[in-house]
Image (tube, grey):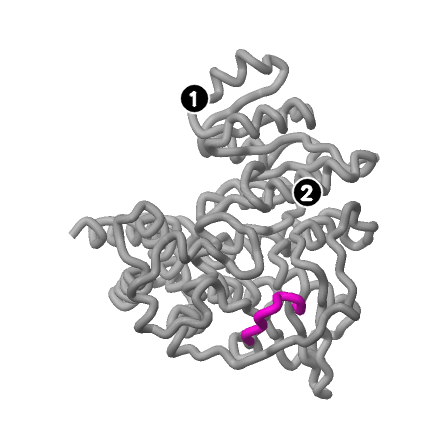
Amino acid sequence: MKKKISLLGATGSIGKSTLDVLRNNPEMFELVAFSFYSNIELAKKIIEEFQPKIVGVRDQSMAQTLTALYPKVEFIAELQGLIAVATAKDVKIVLTALIGSVGLLPTMAAIKNGKDIALANKEILVMAGYWVMQAAKENDVKILPVDSEHSAIFQVLQGQDMKNIKELVITASGGSFRDLTREELKQVTLEDALQHPNWAMGKKITIDSSTMVNKGLEVIEAHWLFNASYDKIKVVLHRESTVHSMIRLVDGAYFAQLGASDMREPIQYALTFPNRRPLKKEKVFDIADVAVLHFDKLDKERFPMLALAFAVGVKGGSFPTVFNAANEVAVNAFIAGKIKYLEIENLIQRAVAKHQEKENLTLEMVIEIDKQTRQKVYERIKL
């Protein structure tokens, strides 16, 4: 029988790679439902190719437009649409590739409905890792990482006893500005920031990579995914993005996962776990062609957002929520041309410094803190 799939965020870079995996394995997968935000032309092509039953759309107007074109498909708008996609009948696994905290509620709904989660939305665990992992445990649901770094760690952990793990080693390319000084960063532009040296990604994640916020979010995500204390998580600079991440064992041995820079590999592994299948139309990768691999320590003074991510992770509670919310607003403001590049860091640092923790946190309280943080950062940008 085909494995029935829901895809949250079908028109983004991860969504497109996921569709390619499904397209190349039609005998294995059926796309039952998907969501998208604004790329209606691509959405039409997806509907015509995959014939889904449910599509989550941005607003009611878009739902009406598409219903007229595809009367056999159910179009549902806004948050209700995301939840409908995440909880679609007979779906076994939901791949959540939404950007930012918008993925939290539909992912929680999927978990409570017993769906396994292929997770490409790290902000969900950063914002509400405790509640997400608790719900997964209570509902006997797998959280399968799709980020290349976390998939790498997940893969090399197979067959390992966690008591033998000394360190999780997350690799970082260094992003667009890895060779620039702090002084040189004052003059960079949006176009500069979007020139990632190794990966083709969406705007937000590319900018997050350049500030090292993305790597900080990955550290917090790794903490929740692998139940690892922060003193057992390390980040190293690795320019080639060939070693996607590693683990270090108590006897000093390193286990690493290497491969081409192709997001289809971790996506396919999450969708077929615990099995593996050949990756069709794979990128050519021959270890004999890898001339040299570089690894360097990361300077946390040069990349203060990485240091701050470790700090808010250790503090726990809603501090990671504030860190993430402030970043999302700040990055969107930079993309819109409202602030300069280094102001992203300033806005995040200010939000975290001014945050006062609440006692007896609930998920509802965290969602409200996320909302309040965004509003405060918006107001700060308008000053």
Q: Is residue 356 visible?
A: no
Range of residues picked out in magenta: 236-243
The answer to which image quadrant residue 235 occupies is bottom right
Q: Which residue is mark 1?
A: 60
Q: Residue at x 69, y 49 (%)?
A: 264
Give the image quarter of residue 2: top right
- Disc 1 marks a residue whose amino acid type is Gln
Which sits in the foreground, 30 or 91?
Answer: 30
Tag 2 secondary structure: strand
> Residue lying furthest bottom in this view?
251
The mark closer to the camera, 1 or 2, is 1
Residues at discs 1 and 2 in contact (Cβ within 8 Å): no
**Separation of residues labelled 1 and 2 (CA atoms):** 27 Å
Q: Badge 1 local density, few (<14 within 10 Å), some, or many (20+)?
A: few
Residue 277 image offset from top left, x and y in percent: 82, 50
The residue that mark 2 highlights is 93
